[in-house]
Amino acid sequence: MACNDNENLLHAYFDGELDLAHSLEFENHLKSCAECSRDFEAQRAMRKSLSAANLYERAPESLRAKLRVQLPGEMPVQSVSPQRRSAIEWLAVAAAIFIAIVLGVRMIPDIVGGRQHTNLLAEQIVASHIRSLQPGHLFDVQSTDQHTVKPWFDGKLDFAPQVTDLANEGFPLIGGRLDYLDHRDVAALVYQRQKHFINVFIWPGDSKAANVSEAQAIRGYNVVSWQRGGMDFCAVSDLNSAELEQFAKLLQH
C-alpha cells in the first residue's frame, strides 16, 4: 500500500466506506507504518474532540435588541366584513394544508436518510464482527470473569459498559475489546455459544429511546439491536436468530 494514498483511505476508513478486504489491508498497514499510525491516531483524536465540543454560540443580546428595534410595530386593528372574514379563514385553512404537505414532503428525505444511516451502521457492525474473527482480532482482554473485563475498559472509553456473564444460561463471556463504529469508540463484548462467537457492541445512545428490540439478517449474519438505560446495544453472530434473540433478552433483564 503506497503511503501517499493513505490520506484518502484514512478518511474512508473513519467514514465506514471501505469494504472488509480494504479495511483489513489498511489496518495491517498501520501495524507496520509508524507515520501512518501517527496520522491515524491524530485523526481519531481530532474527530473525538470535535464530536465532544459544543460548537453552538448564542447570539449576543445587543444583536437581539437591535433586531427588536427594527421590527415593525403592531398594526392597527381594522373591522372586517363577514364575507371577507370567511374568505380569509378559507385561505388560512388552504395555506395550513399546503404547509403541511410541503413539510411532509421535506421530511421524507430525513426519514429515508435515517434509514440509510441505520442500514450503514448495521453493515459496519457486521463488517466489524467479521474482522474480529480474523486471527488476533477477537480480544483486547481475554477472560471469563466479568470483574476482569469491565475494569479493563476504565479510562479507555467515555462511558462504562454493562458487562454481564451469562455462563449459567449457556452464553459464557470470554472477553472484550475496543472497536470503532459511526465515528466513535465503542465497547465490544465477546460471548460464545458452543462454537459460535457473539459480538455485543455498546455505545451511548438516545436516553429517551424506547426499549424495543429490532432483529435483521445481513450477509448471512443475524443482528439484534436494542436500547437500555441511555445506551445502544447490538449483538451480531452467525448463531441462529432464535438463540441470538434469546441471548439479547437475557442481556436486557
Image (spheres, grey):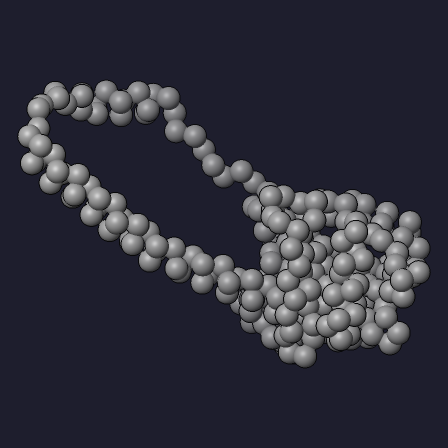
Residue farthest front in this picture: 82
**Residue 179, visible in the rendered structure:** no
The residue positioned 79% from the left and 70% from the top of the image is: 243
Q: Residue 135 in the image: x percent, y percent?
A: 82, 75
Q: Residue 23 in the image: x percent, y percent?
A: 65, 72
- Relative placement, left or right, of 172 versus 119 is right
- Relative placement, left or right, of 130 versus 85 is right
Q: If the image is split into quadrants, where does the N terminus sit?
A: bottom right
- Along the line of sight, the residue nearer the viewer: 216 or 188: 216
The residue positioned 49% from the left and 59% from the top of the image is: 114
- Along the line of sight, the residue nearer the viewer: 26 or 53: 53
**Residue 58, visible in the rendered structure:** yes
Looking at the image, residue 73 lies above or below residue 231:
above
Residue 82, quarter of picture: top left
Residue 202, quarter of picture: bottom right
Q: Residue 98 in the image: x percent, y percent?
A: 24, 51
- Relative placement, left or right, of 92 versus 242 is left
Labels in figure, total: 0
The residue positioned 85% from the left and 50% from the top of the image is: 150
Q: Residue 6 in the image: x percent, y percent?
A: 58, 68
- Along the line of sight, the residue nearer the viewer: 14 or 36: 14
The residue positioned 93% from the left and 60% from the top of the image is: 168
- Relative placement, left or right, of 53 versus 138 is left
- Along the line of sight, the residue nearer the viewer: 16 or 122: 122
Residue 49, quarter of picture: top right
